[in-house]
Image (tube, rainbow, N blue to C red):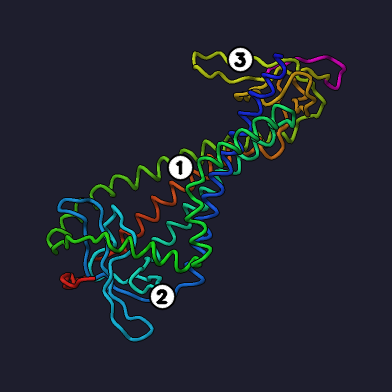
């Protein structure tokens, strides 16, 4: 009875990891697919920002008003389909590259926004990979697993039933027409407040001051993360290079010494070192639920100088955490440097008239 309950509990947690990973990676792939569609299906134009709009006075969400000439030679002034709290670099007179579909010339996306969409999609897709890997490593196919899979499938089908009409409509009308209808609905939500040149100057000055503090902080945090993750990678690589291998057996799982409501479980592993001595140690990495069951065979790496200094060899996953830390540090540091370089070259051109309507 207890074994069956444990199987259901373990399967539930493993499948939650898989579900979380699938959601993150799925969202990321959808975003990347949309970004690819924009690049492939829509035309690229050179445009100029001629105004800045907001939804209401005092709003900190800014929508650029861009002017461009389409393939038919018609000059258009339209509000970009995405707003931002960032106004520096999006002031009147700024030259920008935009994307617009011939079938929806009033729905434009700035190239800078396209890159943001692409990066967010890549991050979401990458974030899902560790959850998927952890879920698969924890998953054991038992009757409890089958029961949990059926329960989750039934619940998911019930919750997603509302998407069926939308999917049927998209299939009948085609993705391009569905997207056009969506953007038309978005366009109906106009951004009526046009900022004056004085208001734009004040917003730029305030934001420039804030960014002057944020950029060094981003670079400092990024450098610290890269250094810390780099040391972790170096120490792991040095240990693995000298370590010996042995087959170990999981004796039990011990709860971490914590007051948290959901403690993590650490495998206690026994193995025999090269001298024939039996070594029992507690693995430093814990999880909830346990990643290993009692009796599982695992590959152990241990130091020839001190056998009790050991770790379960998790393959590529032993590099994952330090690599994520280094990648996060690189992202922060790059954002700080890019912002600093952009601040040097960005100059505000004379404001163009902002009275045009969409």
| In-front residue for pair 245/196 | 196
**Residue marked by disc 2:** 103
At label 3, counting other C-alpha atoms closer than 10 Å, the crowd grade (few under 14, some 14-19, many 20 or more) is some
CB of mark 1 within 8 Å of CB of mark 3? no
Q: Which mark is residue 344?
A: none
| Mark 1–mark 3 distance (CA, rounded to whole Å) | 34 Å
Q: Residue at x 28, y 66 (%)?
A: 79
Circle 1 packing at 10 Å, graded few (<14), some (14-19), many (20+), is: many
Image depth: mark 1 or mark 3 in front: 3
Vertical side of 91 occupied by 289: above or below: above
Q: List the residue tagged with mark 1.
A: 223
Whether residue 238 is visible = yes
Residue 239 appears anywhere in the view: no
Which disc is residue 255 wearing?
Answer: 3
Q: Position of residue 118 (x, y in %)?
A: 48, 58
Number of numbered discs on residues: 3
Mark 2 vs mark 1: give the one in front. Answer: 2
At numbered mark 2, what does the secondary structure look like: helix, strand or loop? Answer: loop
Q: Residue at x 51, y 39 (%)?
A: 227
As displayed, is residue 275 above or below residue 144?
above
- The x and y percentages for residue 348 are 23, 66
Q: Are the two marked residues, 3 and 2, in contact with CB atoms closer than 8 angstroms?
A: no
Looking at the rendering, the stretch of residues picked out in magenta corresponds to: 273-282
Residue 179 magenta-drawn? no
At 49% across and 13% down in the image, what residue appears?
259
Query: Is 277 above or below relative to 314?
Result: above
> In terms of sequence position, does the residue under pointer 2 or pointer 1 come before the other?
2
């Amino acid at each position: 009875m207890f074994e069956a309950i444990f199987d259901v509990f373990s399967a539930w947690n493993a499948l939650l990891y898989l579900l979380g990973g699938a959601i993150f990676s799925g969202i990321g792939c959808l975003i990347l697919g949309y970004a690819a569609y924009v690049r492939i299906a829509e035309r690229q134009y050179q445009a100029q920002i001629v105004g800045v709009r907001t939804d209401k006075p005092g709003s900190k969400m800014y929508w650029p008003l861009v002017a461009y000439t389409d393939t038919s030679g018609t000059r258009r002034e339209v509000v970009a389909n995405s707003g931002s709290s960032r106004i520096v670099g999006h002031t009147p007179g700024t030259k920008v590259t935009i994307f617009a579909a011939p079938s929806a010339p009033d729905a434009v996306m700035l190239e800078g926004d396209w890159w943001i969409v692409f990066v967010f999609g890549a991050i979401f897709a990458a974030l899902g990979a560790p959850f998927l890997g952890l879920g698969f490593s924890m998953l054991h196919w038992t009757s409890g697993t089958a029961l949990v899979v059926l329960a989750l499938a039934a619940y998911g089908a019930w919750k997603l039933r509302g998407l069926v009409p939308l999917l049927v409509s998209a299939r009948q009308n085609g993705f391009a027409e569905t997207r056009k209808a969506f953007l038309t609905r978005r366009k109906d939500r106009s951004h009526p407040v046009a900022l004056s040149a004085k208001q734009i100057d004040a917003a730029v000055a305030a934001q420039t001051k804030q960014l002057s503090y944020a950029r060094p902080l981003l670079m400092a945090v990024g450098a610290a993360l890269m250094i810390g993750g780099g040391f972790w990678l170096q120490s792991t690589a040095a240990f693995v290079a000298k370590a010996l291998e042995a087959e170990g057996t999981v004796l039990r799982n011990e709860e971490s010494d914590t007051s948290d409501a959901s403690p993590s479980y650490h495998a206690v592993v026994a193995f025999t070192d090269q001298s024939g001595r039996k070594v029992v140690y507690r693995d430093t990495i814990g999880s909830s639920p346990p990643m290993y069951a009692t009796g599982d065979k695992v590959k152990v790496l241990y130091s020839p100088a001190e056998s009790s200094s050991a770790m379960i060899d998790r393959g590529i996953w032993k590099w994952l955490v330090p690599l994520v830390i280094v990648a996060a540090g690189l992202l922060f540091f790059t954002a700080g440097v890019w912002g600093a370089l952009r601040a040097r070259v960005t100059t505000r051109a004379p404001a163009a008239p902002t009275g045009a309507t969409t």
